Amino acid sequence: MIPAISQTSPVQGLYLSFIDTLKSCGFEGDLSPDYANRTVLATDNSIYQVLPQGVLYPKNIDDLVKIAEVSNMRQFQGVVLSPRGGGTGTNGQSLTDGLIVDISKHMNQILEINVEEGWARVQTGVVKDQLNAAAKEHGLFFAPELSTSNRATIGGMINTDASGQGSCVYGKTRDHVLELKTVLLDGTEWVSHAMSDTELEAVKNQPNRAGQIHRVIDDINNNYRDEIEAKFPKLNRCLTGYDLAHIRDDNGNFNLNNILCGSEGTLGFIAEAKINLLKIPKYTALVNLRYSNFDACLRHASRLMAAGPTSIETVDSKVMSLAQSDIIWNTVGHFFDDDSDNELAAINLVEYTNDDEEQLKSDIKRLTDQLEGTDASNPSYGYSIAYGADVGKIWAMRKKSVGLLGKSKGEARPIPFVEDTAVPPENLADYIQEFRALLDENNLKYGMFGHVDAGVLHVRPAVDMKDPDQEPMIRDITDKVVELTDKYNGLVWGEHGKGFRSEYATTFFGDLYPQLQRIKAEFDPRNQLNPGKIATPNSGIPLIKVDEVVTRGQEDRKIPVKSWQAYQEAVYCNGNGACYNYNPNDAMCPSWKATRERIHSPKGRSSLIREWLKQLAERNIDPQVESEKAKQKSFLVSLLPRIQNTVKKQKGEYDFNHEIHTAMMGCLACKSCVGQCPINVDVPEFRSKFLELYYARYLRPLKDYFIGGLEFTIPYLAKAPWLYNAPLSLNPVKKLFAQYAGMVDSPKLSGIHLDQALAEIGVLYAVPENIATLDAEQKNTSVIIVQDAFTSFFETQFLLDALKLLKALGFNPMLAPYKANGKPLHVHGFLKQFKNVASKTADFLNGLNYSEIPLVGLEPSMTLAYRSEYKKVLGEDAPKVQLIQEWLAEQDLSDKADNFSGESFTLFGHCTEKTNAAASMKDWSKIFSDLNLAYKEESVGCCGMAGTYGHETQNVDNSKAIYALSWEPKIDQLNDTTQVMATGYSCRCQTKRLSDVEVPHPLQALLKAYQQ
């Protein structure tokens, strides 16, 4: 069995004392010195990994003030503090070996939206898309556009002075900041805004830290204006971090916000922001140009700018080819398909926006006329145009570029370390040509994408950081890129901040660097706030160098190759943070949304598994060997040691395995991560592997055996359903079941005798003797329905309704004899038993394939197990079972349209189905369209049930919280004009349980709409 991991990297006594003092001072938020939280927040989206001493989650500004005040106590003046937002930084901006102050968990409220004046006041933990969703109701939006907008916080945007697509029109974050409330390191709450000279003089006269800060910064502006003017490049991206060139704004006012924006948490805790909102353009369109030559694409972009678009983005063939294997391609692929013989090397996305639709069309026509003319300067070989909602879908693909590059095959994968350079747009093509030559000289592959209109192209070279021989390239290439960028009058730090790349600031700023140090010294004289980045408070303290920080690769190379490959569904997570998606109407990731705890996210769980593998390796433990031992050892032989270890656990004996177990048990196993993570991180897969080994050391809860065995016992219980249903109706039994079996609100058997019901509707079982009676014509119209425990025994009426509908449509449905699917076994880590069940069921279903009659399943999660979990253990021997809509969409239903009627139908999709079989959701649309029925798919998140997750006592609160995020408000808004449908059994069960609303399956809705 795996050992107890009782020793990890301990928290230093100084930091434990700091945390205890905070607690005694009335800190209201969360204080987390546990190893799991520390591990998860040791990484961001950069190449670095720095283990913090703990994580502080302040609940309000008072908590931030307490952190600052305690840090001023003499004994804690060596404590390091680093603010953190969404954790999507590419340069290690928020990584620290001190304490992380994560504002996003609690301080994430939109405080006010002033529609008349066009501004919002928010806590800085608010996510950009969260703000824009609220502002959209008023026709407004917060302009700076980011690829990480669904998880990037406003505080993070401010601290990196973020910008992105459309910045040539909308500028950077600082251009939209009206007011900031910052907690300074002495505990002062300071509100900064643009101020007149009169206001400035009044502040400068104050005998406090704020007064001194203003005196110093004003002095720098007055005495070094010429040097600043000469040094700072005239670029759209300007400069992130202590922007001396904009101490005075465009109106001549002194504006401290322009120093704070881009300061990366090195100057204070920015707690609240008042930010400018703009009117949403009424109309938008995107011209998507295709090129067979990347250089030609870049050079064309500068000429396209003359056509006056809102923005131009470029994506190379590397990203495009990866996008084609991603879920996103289902929504955008048709915009990039063509019949030409050209090989796609790059695309330019040219956006137009306008409040006048005719003017928008006129602008586009002017461009397309130019493209279709005889002008030899047009190197593109084709284009498409997207309008309205389709524009957002294509931008969503562009936003996934970072994640998609992490999906590249092999160990060398594109990583960020020179990906944020900016040069004058007219220099970009020549600059990139030399940049590519540099990478080619080093035999490096790479991916490119970015904002060509602003002279920014993100270049990610593919390096295997686990290889010690490749690691030195980080320094070598970075130095050469810095020289190259300087040659073309550009900046190394375009929009993603400095972080651990700050070392080049001394060279870039030259004689001005001491002025940055003066600013740092006034805000943070003891170098406690995110030290070593942007500037240090005095010349005796150096900046951190790019190759002096621990990297993920250095830690990952401690994991044996065998273990790395065995857990590849976890280890390739690159930290892009797509799983931190705030959107409650998106499937990914429900446990993160409900808890706001980063350990309960795919990124968090992947980080924990990587650390766990490293800890096992340090103890010379091979998890694959232990897995085989666990499968071989009998239950009784292992019982006594498991009891002994469980007693130790109950007595509080520490084991890092428990922290990982807590994170894994929060997972719903909905598999949204598999479909939506651009890396395809598969938490349910590595979760099951971990649980197998964890429960080889500790006792399993009783509910695991109940759930795992239900598929096998339920056919017998169904013969006398009252034996199962009656006790579950008694309150004393319910309480006992909840307390000791760990289950609540267990569904009851339908009580329908299936064999008798099948005989009544004229449906036969798919057994050889019945199949043998079919003639060729009957075979052509036949389909075999593969049973699952949920629909056959708990929703038998749905199964019968599905069969009735298929008969009404002119098909000959047959029912495969019931066989256990085994998915519940896999979910709970019974991997030996799952493989046995999968092998037997696969043999049976493959045996039906001789008939050449299609096999179809009704329950999405169980059906998709045949192409996922089964495929992983059986390979090509996994049975081919289609989702019902996949098969129906292949049939011609149009001649049956006259038999159907109904007002409109709205589908609430199942998470696993939407994310792992995305194309199948379009099949429902086709089916309803063929029958001339009005149909739409509702954008909805997770229902919170996910098989038996919501029925497990320990998960009830989270299950209800998840349901309340998306399903509950949408179900509550139902009206009589539309028929709501749900494809998932668990979704229908949850809706009935929590909203007392019975929602039919689409097949049941169609049967109801059918007229003889």
Image (spheres, grey):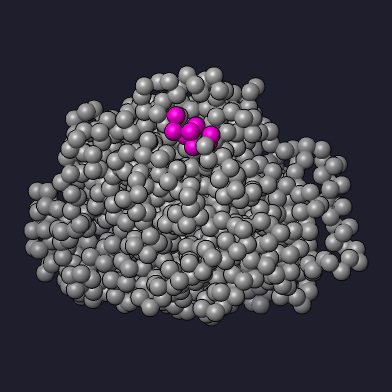
**Residue 176 picture quarter:** top right
Q: Is residue 159 above or below residue 823?
A: above
Q: Is residue 608 above or below residue 438?
A: above
Q: Please provide the residue range marked out in magenta.
A: 215-222
Q: Residue lying at the far right in this picture: please name it.
A: 374
* Left/right of residue 827 with respect to residue 226 in the rendered view: left
User: Residue placed at 76% from the left, 63% from the top?
Assistant: 300
Q: Nearer the viewer, residue 876 or 589?
A: 589
Q: Is residue 832 magenta?
A: no
Most frequent secondary structure within the magenta stretch: helix
* Left/right of residue 110 with respect to residue 730 in the rendered view: right
- Report if residue 751 is visible in the image: no
**Residue 385 picture quarter:** bottom right
Q: Is residue 257 above or below residue 682?
A: above
User: Residue placed at 19% from the left, 58% from the top?
Assistant: 8
Q: Is residue 220 magenta?
A: yes
Q: Quadrant of the N terminus?
A: bottom left
Task: Give how far across and how far down residue 276 sits, in percent.
Answer: 60, 31
Task: Give how far across and how far down residue 440 sits, in percent.
Answer: 56, 78
User: Residue placed at 31% from the left, 50% from the top?
Assistant: 540
Task: Give how far across and how far down residue 13 sits, in percent.
Answer: 15, 46
Task: Give how far across and how far down residue 820 sits, in percent.
Answer: 38, 65
* Left/right of residue 250 with respect to residue 466 in the rendered view: right
**Residue 435 picture quarter:** bottom right
Q: Nearer the viewer, residue 880 or 102?
A: 102
- Report if residue 29 is visible in the image: yes
